[in-house]
Image: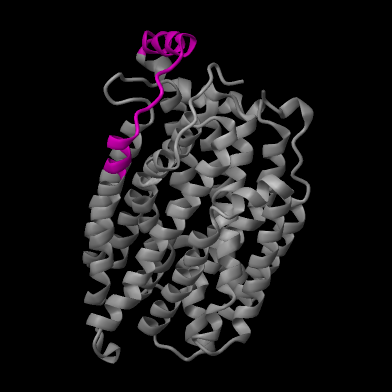
Amino acid sequence: MDLFKKPTLSFWQIFNMNVGFLGIQFSFGLQQTAINPVFLFLGAPEDMLPILNIAGPVTGLVVQPIIGAISDKTWSPRWGRRKPFFLIGAIIGSLCLFAFPLSPALWFAVGLLWILDVGNNMAMEPYRAFVGDKLPEKQLSLGYQMQSLFVGAGIVLANASIFLFQDWFGGDTSIEVAGTIPKWLYYSFFIGSVLSVGTILWSVIKTPEIPPSYEELKEINSHKSLPFIERFKMPFIEISNAVKEMPKFMWKLSIVYLFQWYALFVYWQYITPLFMKTMGFDLSSAAAQSAKMSTTYNIATVVVALMLVPLTLKYGGKKIYAASLLGTGLALLSIPYITDPVYVLFPMVFFGIGWAAMMGIPYTMVSKIVPQERRGVYMGILNMMIVIPMGIETLTFGMIYKNLLGANAINAIIFAGIFFIISALLALRLNVSKEEERD
């Protein structure tokens, strides 16, 4: 139960609160679309792509819940509770984005991805909790769907920049030097470096945090008075206790996430190789086409994100979420059979609706049932449910791709589509029990 009544915020206050997601998601957009082509440019074999992406699952699993637990026990009258963490994370991410296209070798790029993911995860989790901290329950859906809007907008800008810069500055892709990153790809990373810090600063300056209640402040001060070793152990104890006491709803959601996020990681890794096979593109053209795909579905996300708010209020989050996952699965099943680079963009509208739902609806549902004083750690645990499937995918899908799917990117995307349909069916089980409802 929330300890005090939160004020209702205006549309533009909620907008300003979420602007920082633009920079964070520009960075994630580059990770989705540009990182794997960079690895391929630097000589990585296709079946190594999953394991080269293991940084995301590992850092998400470790960093987000720990930062969430620490931020729950933090308060500074000057800096707030969540802001210091996502500002530091944005600075780390900004430096890595600037350095990434300058990578001289594959090992260097892989190492930078680890540091970049630490920064992005450090920024992401407190930001999720920050929105929940600020908004009354009646505005949670609007707040998290506004995040979906900025998720889509950030990724749209990231991916549009990739194919536009290739068109403007790419020249003849046939003369690109093997083992090097083409110069046209540099500009997107440099823009992301600026946006990562700039948009977070906007939200930090424009949005004050709500001070903790007397009871929360008393607990925070009690935590500060503990010996260092006790404070060091506390986040791990908090995470362990939170998992033990986790609502049944979140356990059900974890099964949905297992299939959903496994499928998403497969899609992001193998959409570029798919176009090299189905359309006969070289690597640069395939990377640009995958950027167009991502731009299309994220434009759809921007358009529909806020439209989902009244739909979820009318029909319930569970039904809209399940329908969106089903549409995403059907979109992926159709993509390998479309060989026209324009027509293949149409299924991405359904993918974009699904992405808008994935980035908003589960956070709204979870935020309504977890206690205010533990929101940070539970948002971190929710992210664990994302990165564990990703980690499983990075460890298993390379072997599946090589030995069961014939090292064929077409089969990989079909595999992802089937997993999305399974996740849609499982989402129909997402019911909140009476005991889990909060006043």
Q: Which x, y percent locates residue 346?
A: 57, 78
Check if residue 215 falls in the magenta segment.
Answer: yes
Q: Which x, y percent locates residue 333?
A: 66, 75
Check if residue 304 falls in the magenta segment.
Answer: no
In the rendered view, does 111 fall on the left or right side of 426? left
Q: Nearer the viewer, residue 116 or 228?
A: 116
Indicate whether 87 appears above or below 244: below
Q: In which quarter of the image is the C terminus?
A: top right
Residue 27: which quarter of the image?
bottom left
Q: Measuring 51% from the left and 62% from the top, which residue is drawn there? A: 303
Residue 73 appears in the rendering? yes
In the rendered view, does 310 fall on the left or right side of 32? right
In the rendered view, does 370 fall on the left or right side of 88? right
Residue 70: which quarter of the image?
top left
**Which residues, given as a range, are shown in magenta?**
200-227
Q: Measuring 68% from the left and 51% from the top, which residue is drawn there? A: 256
Q: Measuring 58% from the left and 55% from the top, which residue is drawn there? A: 307
